[in-house]
Amino acid sequence: MEHILSLRADLLERGDKWENPTLERYLEALASWLAVSPNWYRNFGQEMPTGGDWTLFARALSAAVVYE
């Protein structure tokens, strides 16, 4: 919950810096990032959590701020 509130505060403070400041664009970026997230983990020499986990969810929420 803390991470989501932090993202909200960042949007309110620096939304003009976000690549995806609208809900529509944010959700589209979130879905896109999740689709390629195995590559992100591979690029960082990590194994993607099987079935996902809270870290993956938080990382996906953060990635959707800037993902194109």
Image (cartoon, rainbow, N blue to C red):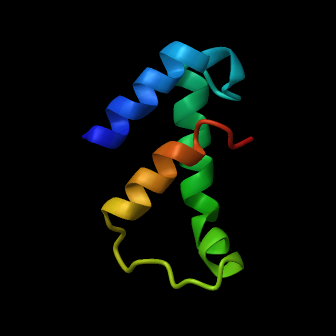
Q: Quadrant of the N terminus?
A: top left
Q: Residue 23: x and y, percent?
A: 51, 22
- Please tell me in which quadrant of the rendered image residue 50 appears: bottom left
- In this image, 29 relative to 23: left or right? right
Please name the residue shown 49% across and 14% down the image.
Answer: 12
- Please tell me in which quadrant of the rendered image residue 41 appears: bottom right
In front of the other: 15 or 38: 15
Q: Quadrant of the C terminus?
A: top right
Q: Residue 58: x and y, percent?
A: 41, 52
Residue projecting furthest to the left = 1
Please name the residue shown 60% across and 17% down the image.
Answer: 15
Above or below, comparing residue 57 to residue 28 in the picture: below
Please name the residue shown 64% across and 63% down the image.
Answer: 36
Residue projecting furthest to the right = 68
Above or below, comparing residue 28 to residue 25 in the picture: below
In front of the other: 1 or 27: 1
Q: Residue 49: x and y, percent?
A: 41, 78
Please name the residue shown 68% across and 15% down the image.
Answer: 16
Report the label total.
0
- In this image, 9 relative to 43: left or right? left
- Please tell me in which quadrant of the rendered image residue 38 appears: bottom right
